């Protein structure tokens, strides 16, 4: 595999500048391992993990790379800030487990006081004992958030999330192209590396994650159905705790129609539970980006990585051919 030389690939020691998002319920250790094996860098979405389930994911990862020995695990672990805040004791335990396992990176997003957790990661006794200090990825949905993360919090990588991204994000965020342009104009070249989600040339890798979870019927529906930013899909899951300004993008189903029509949330949850039993796509919660309409089939992560690498190399070569 031909390596692509960027600030991000050098920082992470990878060959392909592709990072799989730390999406709860979608980004498993199995997926993260396959992305890393494919030359990129995989994250595990541990937002709703328990200490036991996190240890199991990390054990699977360590066993997948027996040649590493005690070297850092070539994956990252992602957490959601407001969930960390909700159970401080367990959250510190989760972070300590990550540090004790020498994971290469930690991804943080969606919190009202994320620096609190950045500080804990850096000062935890588990960090002092660790042979590797994890890189810190910070997800930003605005230029202001990104500049604070870089200039004040000194994070290692900023993930620029545009409004078209799937799953949760800033309801007022600009598009990926706009926020990337703003960041590139505002940050010195030697400052924190940038990673976009979704990347414009990748048809949203996060959507590829979702494809590993949903049934073909949901994909067929996605090809002919609009996505929507809404709280309705969270309410079907009985989740009301996202910070102000954060909502989710997913496929518009009858869940959204019912919420907008004033159907009581309890009734929506009852209907959702019954639909989930029979895998009814008309009342399904499927988080995805606007690029989901481009998905035509379900593929293993290895094949997705191979295609992404080939597309990146092809695009770079095409760009070189434009030079006089």
Image (cartoon, helix red, strand yellow):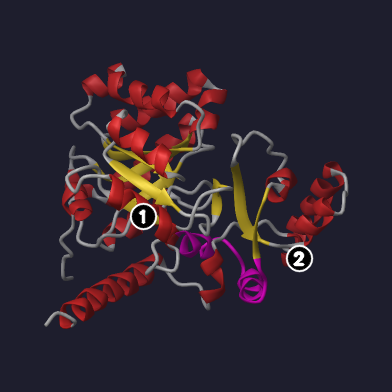
Return the x and y of residue 190 as percentages of the image width and height.
17, 45
Q: Magenta span has 243?
A: no
Q: Compared to 35, does 11 lie above or below?
A: above
Q: Is residue 9 left or right of residue 143?
A: left
Number of numbered callouts drawn: 2
* CA neighbours of label 1 inside 10 A, class few (<14), some (14 to 19), many (20+): many
Locate the C terminus by quadrant. bottom left
Q: Residue at x 36, y 21 (%)?
A: 120
Return the x and y of residue 48 as percentages of the image width and height.
54, 37
Q: Magenta span has 217?
A: yes
In the image shown, does 68 or 322 lie closer to the viewer?
Answer: 322
Q: Which mark is residue 180?
A: 1
Which comes sooner in the sequence, label 2 or label 1?
A: 1
Q: Is residue 283 left or right of residue 178?
A: right
Q: Residue at x 52, y 46 (%)?
A: 24
* CA neighbours of label 2 inside 10 A, class few (<14), some (14 to 19), many (20+): some
Q: CA distance from mark 2 to mark 1?
A: 35 Å
* Disc number lying in front (2 or 1): 1
Q: Could you say whether the residue bearing mark 2 is in a helix, strand or loop?
A: helix
Locate the N terminus by quadrant. bottom left
Whether pointer 2 and pointer 1 mark residues with C-beta atoms closer than 8 Å, the reply is: no
Q: Quadrant of residue 312?
A: bottom left
What residue span does the magenta drawing correspond to?
206-226
Label 2 sits on residue? 282
Return the x and y of residue 319 as percentages of the image width and height.
21, 77
In the image shown, does 180 or 68 lie closer to the viewer?
Answer: 180
């Amino acid at each position: 595999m031909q390596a692509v030389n960027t600030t991000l690939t050098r920082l992470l020691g990878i060959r392909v500048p592709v990072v799989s998002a730390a999406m709860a319920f979608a980004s498993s250790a199995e997926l993260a391992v396959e992305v890393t094996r494919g030359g990129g860098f995989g994250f595990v979405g541990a937002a709703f993990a328990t200490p036991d389930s996190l240890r199991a994911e990390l054990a699977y990862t360590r066993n997948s790379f027996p040649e590493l020995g005690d070297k850092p695990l070539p994956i990252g672990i992602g957490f959601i800030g407001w969930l960390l805040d909700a159970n401080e004791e367990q959250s510190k335990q989760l972070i300590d487990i990550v540090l004790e396992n020498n994971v290469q990176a930690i991804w943080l997003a969606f919190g009202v006081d994320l620096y609190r957790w950045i500080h804990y990661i850096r000062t935890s006794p588990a960090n002092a004992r660790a042979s590797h200090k994890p890189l810190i990825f910070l997800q930003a949905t605005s230029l202001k958030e990104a500049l604070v993360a870089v200039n004040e919090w000194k994070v290692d990588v900023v993930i620029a999330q545009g409004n078209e991204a799937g799953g949760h994000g800033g309801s007022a965020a600009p598009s990926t192209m706009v926020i990337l342009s703003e960041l590139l104009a505002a940050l010195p070249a030697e400052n924190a590396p940038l990673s976009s989600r979704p990347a414009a040339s990748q048809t949203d890798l996060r959507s590829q994650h979702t494809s590993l979870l949903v049934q073909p019927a949901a994909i067929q529906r996605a090809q002919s159905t609009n996505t929507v930013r809404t709280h309705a899909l969270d309410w079907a899951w009985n989740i009301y705790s996202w910070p102000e300004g954060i909502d989710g993008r997913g496929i518009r189903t009858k869940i959204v129609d019912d919420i907008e029509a004033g159907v009581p949330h309890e009734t929506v949850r009852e209907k959702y539970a019954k639909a989930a039993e029979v895998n009814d796509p008309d009342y399904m919660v499927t988080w995805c980006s606007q690029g989901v309409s481009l998905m035509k089939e379900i593929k293993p992560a290895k094949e997705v990585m191979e295609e992404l690498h080939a597309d990146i190399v092809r695009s770079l070569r095409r760009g070189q051919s434009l030079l006089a």
